Amino acid sequence: MPSLRACCEPNTVLTKGNAAVILTVTPNPCVDKTVFIDTLNIGTFMRSQKCTCIPGGKGTNVSRAVKALGGPTKAFVVVGGHPGAHVVDMITNDDGVECIPVWVASQTRTITTVLEESIHRQTAFFEPGSRVTEEEYDRILEIFPEALDEARVVTFSGTVSDPAIRDLYHELIPMAHERGIMTILDSHGPELARALEVKPTMVKPNVAEVSELLGCDLDSDAAKWDAVQTLHDRGIELVALSLGKDGAFVSRKGERYAVRPPEIDEVNPVGSGDALVAGFAIGLLEGMDLAEMARLGCAAGTANAMSWDIGHFTADEVTNLVSQVTVESVA
Ligand SMILES: Nc1ncnc2c1ncn2[C@@H]1O[C@H](COP(=O)(O)OP(=O)(O)OP(=O)(O)O)[C@@H](O)[C@H]1O
Ligand SMILES: [Mg+2]
């Protein structure tokens, strides 16, 4: 069976090559609905001819992207009510990803994005996420170790739904490390700051998230590399600072790369960071070298930005992009 490594060879179809899985953790998933209209008229009743719905909340996007790349993945989600059941159904039946739900009484949120096709403008409405009681929190901590059984890499994406469980990643990451499982953190705000204390294997912030964390502007390449070093100094082995259309700065154990995607017609970059995380997760699972996984992650992020739907690119599209990504070693 061909290895996922084959994705770095152009025009190769990716297939599952590993029994171990990439477990994605989404504490605050959503029903991610997009309503397509021509132009928004505030204060009027608007009818739409097209509406799409996917399971959202970052980690679910990572699972969809891993699956698109032909990788093995399971999704651990905290869900509640009918919208929660809808999320589990979409992950399982639309995305074809095995789902490990932890049920809470409070309802999963819906995020509704209105896309004005005439001017390509998005307006999004975020409902509040589920509240989580102490008993429910304990249940998350109880079920998570079982979900780790086949995991070799675990990704922690997005924020938590309830400030009362802000320590969630701080508690879950060490559980993975105790079992020798690698971890990737992609969050922001207090969750990022707190989870960094337990030293995930890799972090994937974008510039705004690092600026917020460190309280500084990253307006030059030197400032960005300084920020990467600060994260290493806090005990993070692998740092990928994503830069949108400018690619990413990637660094591990003294090896540093500026990774740049080809120029594309950007359609929707939302979820590109999740696709990048998927590429790195596969890279870590497969034991790729840093440059190779950076190329894959960057190409997956770019493929995602080329269409409206999040994580719905094909492995062929990514393999074609991989050869167009440049990786420059930085002293
Ligand atoms: N317009 C673009 N052109 C080419 N590549 C892109 C573009 N936007 C994003 N990418 C690719 O996707 C990667 C991640 O994108 P970005 O830095 O926007 O992530 P992000 O801010 O975490 O996004 P999100 O949180 O919405 O998933 C980039 O490093 C780059 O490789
Ligand atoms: Mg992101």
Image (tube, helix red, strand yellow):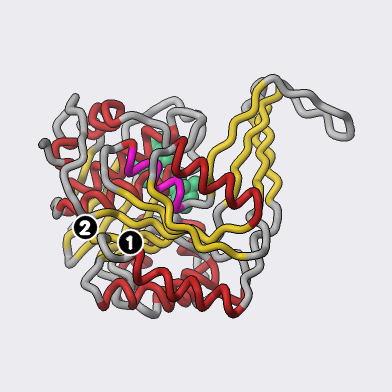
Find residue 206 and report its image quarter: bottom left
Asked whether residue 57 is in view, the answer is yes
The answer to whether 12 is drawn above or below residue 272 in the figure is: above
- Where does the magenta region start and end? 59-67
**Which residue carries the number 1 mark?**
154
Q: Earlier in the sequence, mark 2 or mark 1?
A: 1
Question: Are discs 2 and 1 less than 8 Å apart at CB?
Answer: no
> What percent of the width, then of the height, locates residue 85?
58, 49
Q: State left or right for residue 46 relative to residue 261.
A: right
Rendered image quadrant of residue 118: top right
Which residue is nearer to you in this view: 80 or 329? Answer: 80
Element under disc 1: strand
Residue 108 in the figure: left or right of residue 193 = right
Gap between marks 2 and 1 measured at Cα: 23 Å
Q: Residue at x 31, y 65 (%)?
A: 148
Whole-percent x, y for residue 80 in the image: 62, 58
- Tag 2 residue: 256
Q: Which residue is at the front of the view, 154 or 92?
A: 92
Screen quadrant of the C terminus: bottom left
Give me the residue at 42% from left, 70% from top. 143
> Magenta: predominant secondary structure element?
helix
